[in-house]
Image: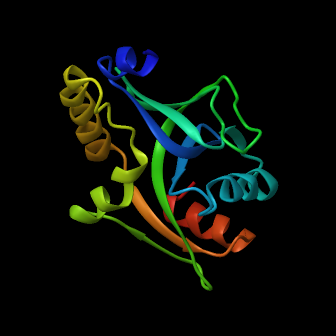
Amino acid sequence: MLYSYLVTRRTLLMHSSLIDYQGNGIMFLGPSGIGKTTQAELWNQFAGADILNGDMVFVRENPDGFYGYGSPWHGSSPYCMNAKVKLRALITLEQASENSIRRLSGFDVLQGIMDQVFLPHWYPEGMTPCLDTLNDLLAQIPVYHLACRPDEDAVQLLKNELQI
């Protein structure tokens, strides 16, 4: 019921972890077990980032841009901070033997994140606002694909790419 209400008010629910690094919101997206919480914990350990949520993040469009919000739903991770941060980037994850990053464009953006967005199939009146919000999010916030090991170099690679 809550999401049915929120989705008509420019709010999405996404399967992701969310960190706040010096006022920059970074979301790590991917299926369970891909390393979303691991990447958040690496940012906490090596860069001092706060982990707002480890599994389910609300994304809301405000007048000054998109924000990520911690939610009370945190899956198997212990992180569920009641806080928000302005979004800087969405990061799709892949486990790899070498670290690499690339900015996604076109269809690759949708392919990378659609499975991580909760679409309100049960609520037809919510689908159009949900997709409109998602369209605006993807037009404003860059999406990257990070193939990585669970190490400090992955953190540094992303920091360099985002220039933060």
Q: Nearer the viewer, residue 162 or 145?
A: 145
Horizontal side of 136 relative to 59 (left or right) equals left
Residue 2 lies, in percent from the top left, at 45, 16
Residue 93 % position (x, y): 52, 64
Q: Which quadrant of the view contains residue 80? A: top right
- All told, the count of numbered labels is 0
What residue sits 36% from the left and 19% below the top? 4
Q: Quadrant of the C terminus?
A: bottom right
Q: Residue furthest bottom?
A: 97
Q: Residue at x 37, y 14 (%)?
A: 5
Depth check, front residue: 101 or 115: 115
- Across and down, in percent, residue 41 comes to 75, 53
Give the side of residue 42 with respect to residue 75, left or right: right
> Could you tell me which quadrant the N terminus lies in?
top left
Q: Residue at x 66, y 43 (%)?
A: 54
Q: Where is residue 105 in the image (x, y as percent from the top left)?
A: 27, 63
Q: Is residue 127 above or below residue 24?
A: above
Q: How was this image coloured?
A: rainbow
Q: In this view, does 56 lie above or below 98?
A: above
Q: Quadrant of residue 81?
A: top right
Residue at left offset 60%, top offset 27%:
71
Quick one: which residue is furthest to the front in this view?
122
